[in-house]
Amino acid sequence: MNASNKTDPVTKVRHFLTLTDLSADEFRQLISRAIELKAMQHRGEIYEPLKNKVLAMIFEKSSTRTRVSFEAGMAQFGGHAIFLSPRDTQLGRGEPIEDSARVLSSMADCLMVRTFEHGKAELLAQYSSVPVINGLTDDVHPCQLLADMQTYLEQRGEIKGKTVTWVGDGNNMCHSYMRAAKLLEFKLNIACPEGFEPQQKFIDECSDHIEITTDVSAACTSSDLIVTDVWASMGQEEEQKVREAAFNDFQVTSELMKLANDDALFMHCLPAHRGEEVSAEVIDGEQSVVWEEAENRLHAQKALLEFLLVN
């Protein structure tokens, strides 16, 4: 079979590489379904729509939540997940992504990739005959936004028309919040130091729903949700000292939370560095929903797997 024939059916496969692979309605349906699946699991109901299905998980970046949530989700759904690190596969020895995609998708029912360059996830999807899920790239972290939006809906209801504040680096999480703001129609204030703004293409795409400022107090005032992330993401560890200086005034503190609305929530995708991007008082405080948010990775991704493989 030549390459062109192999890739003919691929165009019909539904992938989840970024939030804009979903319509606004699909995004909301996934969140609602995640809440249903969570209730079912908490009641101890056995529901196995993916019996005998296999998820191949490709990790170039390490993970706690992504790995455990996908593995547990597949097990609860009656399926199986295979963990593949660069040490375990020929990808780590230079096999082209295109070749790995063809081989893995002939044996597994779904691929999940957590990697650096977003182009790698796109290339994997281009040559895969089964759905590909982005478990994180340097550009975006869409699975986390499914969990975050599920958490907000559970705690406070509809997010449309609300004000969300992002504090810190204009990184992959910030980019995904920008796209979520556009899809779910909330306002996003982005408070970041000069030189650490989101990528211009995301600013251009989401300009109607975002406001970027260096004034963190103004950004947090009357906010319904305050979100942050580590100052140095994976691959930026050598910039830690420079970033510590730049982000010194961008820690989410109790004082900042007091500027937000009384019922404002705090979220963080974890792992967190208490005393850097967030004070211990905030992350361990009453407004923090980080543990619910972390658990919801499991339920949101189960809804996603069901959407891609069953519906």
Image (cartoon, rainbow, N blue to C red):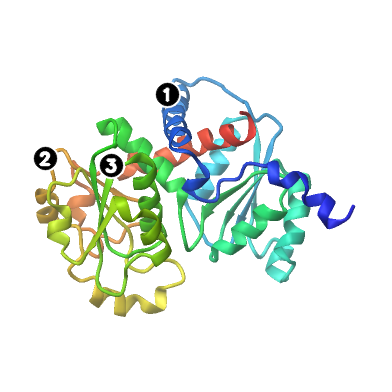
Q: Earlier in the sequence, mark 1 or mark 3?
A: 1
Asked if marks 1 and 3 touch (Cβ < 8 Å), the reply is no
Closer mark to the observer between disc 2 and disc 1: 2
Within 10 Å of the Cα at label 3, are there few (<14), some (14-19), or many (20+) other Cα atoms?
A: some
Q: Amino acid at mark 3?
A: Val
Mark number, residue 304: none
Q: Amino acid at mark 1?
A: Ala
Looking at the rendered image, the quarter that the C terminus falls into is: top right
- Closer to us: 99 or 253: 99
Residue on which disc 2 sits: 262
Name above or below for residue 250 compared with residue 34: below
Identify the residue at horizontal 30%, vertical 37% (top origin): 152
Corner quadrant of residue 238:
bottom left
Q: Earlier in the sequence, mark 2 or mark 1?
A: 1
Counting from the top left corner in percent of width and height, residue 51 is at 68, 29
Give the alpha-carbon distance from disc 3 to disc 2, as whole Å.
15 Å
- Closer to us: 121 or 286: 121
Identify the residue at horizontal 31%, vertical 45% (top origin): 290
Residue on which disc 1 sits: 39
Identify the residue at horizontal 55%, vertical 66% (top origin): 117
Asked if marks 3 and 2 touch (Cβ < 8 Å), the reply is no
Q: Secondary structure at mark 3?
A: loop
Mark number, residue 289: 3
Closer mark to the observer between disc 3 and disc 2: 2
